[in-house]
Image: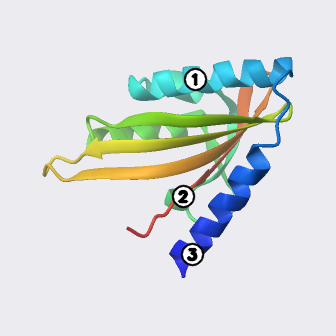
Amino acid sequence: MKTITTLILSAILLVSCTQQNPESPASTENEKIVKQYFEHFNQHDWKKVAEMYTPVADFKDPSLGQGIVKQTRQQIIEKYSGFGDMFPDLKAEVVQIYPSGNNHICVEFITKGTAPDSSKFVLPICTVFTIENGQITKDFSYYDNVQ
């Protein structure tokens, strides 16, 4: 049932995220910000990743629990450092970026990594970023966490 719910939510999310204004300067700037974010992520520069957020940002992420969770930059660094320690080759491959209005951008990506026991994982994720004044204020990620 969770898989069906995840698929339905993903479909709704992708449909809503494709309603975009490609001419919007804000959308273009937000796309640059997101591309920079994933460069920092793939370099495991967690401090630079965290600096892209406001001092306290809203997250929806199954790894943090249900609902919206506020995270400080330091908490963001700690979260991603933990992932980087568990999966030293952690990478995110952006599949598609979907600008949506002036403040939102949806990113479909695949995260991959190898654990110390040589087991590998591949996790498709869709994240809706809210960007205001050049910083990420909200990071709402959707993925199947029952694998």
Q: Position of residue 29 (x, y in %)?
A: 74, 18
Name the residue type under label 3: Ile
Percent position of residue 30, x then y? 73, 24
Q: Amino acid at mark 2?
A: Leu
The percent position of residue 54, horizontal first and vertical second, equals 71, 31
Q: Mark 3 vs mark 1: give the one in front.
A: 3
Q: Mark 3 touching mark 1, by CB under 8 A?
A: no
Crowd band around label 2 with a 10 angstrom C-alpha radius: few (<14), some (14–19), many (20+): few
On residue 74, the disc is none
Question: What residue did someone put label 2 on?
Answer: 64
Give residue 116's position: percent from left, percent from top. Answer: 16, 46
Residue 114 location, quadrant: top left
- Which residue does the numbered mark 3 point to in the structure image? 4
Is 43 on the left-hand or right-hand side of 38?
left
Residue denoted by label 1: 35
The answer to whether the residue labelled 2 contacts the one labelled 3, judged by CB atoms less than 8 Å apart, is: no
